[in-house]
Image (cartoon, grey):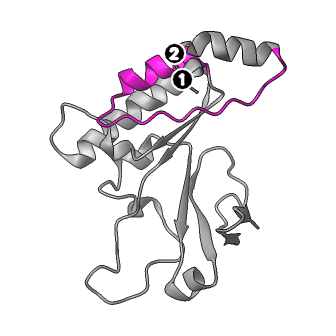
């Protein structure tokens, strides 16, 4: 592990020469910036980039909504520049907070935490993961397709229920 970390580019090159195609690298940045992410993209040349909590990336804007929108635009430009698939993960605002109600099962664009326009506007596909308390106890989640610019067919925004087994990581 230490050798790979000290010679990242060489390690990836050798891995690919030996027939390795899938290479997963997790980078923890706290705080992080889109510029820091771009440097990692240049080093690793990923086909898929997953960013957990875009809301935590640094930005000069003070407001959370403005910060998320500015960083979402930067990330979208980065993905386009390097022609890679981007997945960003954020959390939904809690509509049930203080109302003692079940959380929503199917989520919409307005459920993205701290942003009803900015962050969702920068995405091509927006998935929501929700579930009420009974579903959560059964190991189920509802996947909603809150936005889909990739397909406009009659079922392009139809959600579905999936089950998961945390002990095995299997999702059905």
Q: How many marks?
A: 2
Q: Farthest residue in the front direction? A: 2
Count residues near mark 1 (Cα–Cα under 10 Å), then give few for <14, some for 14-19, many for 20+.
Answer: few
Residue at 38% x, 43% y is 54
The vertical placement of 143 against 133, above or below, is above
Residue 137 position, x and y percent, is 57, 85
Res 39 → quadrant? top left
Q: CA distance from mark 2 to mark 1?
A: 6 Å
The magenta stretch spans residue 19:
yes
The residue nearer to you, when weighing 34 against 121, is 34
Assess whether mark 1 and mark 2 are in contact (beta carbons under 8 angstroms).
Answer: yes
Count residues near mark 2 (Cα–Cα under 10 Å), then give few for <14, some for 14-19, many for 20+.
Answer: few
Circle 2 sits in a helix, a strand or a loop, which is it? helix
Circle 1 sits in a helix, a strand or a loop, which is it? helix
The residue nearer to you, when weighing 27 against 124, is 27
The vertical placement of 26 against 16, above or below, is below
Q: Is residue 33 left or right of residue 155?
A: left
Residue at 60% x, 12% y is 9
Give the labeled residue for mark 1: 2
The numbered disc on residue 32 is none
Res 170 → quadrant? bottom right
Residue 57 position, x and y percent, is 32, 37
Give the labeled residue for mark 2: 6
Residue at 39% x, 28% y is 74
The vertical placement of 19 against 126, above or below, is above
Q: Is residue 54 visible?
A: yes
Res 12 → quadrant? top right
Q: Please state the extent of the stretch shown in magenta in the rendering.
A: 18-45
Q: Farthest residue in the left direction? A: 62
Q: Is residue 117 left or right of residue 15?
A: left
């Amino acid at each position: 592990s230490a050798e790979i970390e000290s010679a990242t580019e060489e390690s990836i090159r050798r891995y690919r020469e030996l027939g390795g195609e899938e290479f997963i690298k997790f980078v923890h940045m706290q705080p992080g910036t889109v510029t820091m992410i771009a440097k990692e993209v240049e080093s690793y040349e990923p086909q898929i980039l997953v960013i957990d909590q875009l809301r935590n990336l640094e930005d000069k804007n003070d407001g959370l909504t403005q910060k998320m929108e500015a960083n979402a635009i930067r990330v979208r430009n980065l993905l386009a520049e390097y022609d890679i698939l981007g997945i960003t993960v954020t959390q939904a605002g809690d509509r049930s907070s203080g109302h003692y109600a079940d959380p929503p099962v199917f989520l919409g664009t307005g459920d993205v935490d701290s942003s009803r326009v900015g962050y969702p506007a920068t995405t091509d596909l927006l998935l929501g993961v929700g579930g009420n308390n009974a579903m959560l106890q059964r190991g189920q989640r509802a996947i909603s397709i809150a936005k889909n610019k990739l397909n406009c067919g009659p079922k392009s925004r139809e959600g579905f229920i999936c089950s998961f087994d945390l002990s095995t990581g299997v999702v059905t």
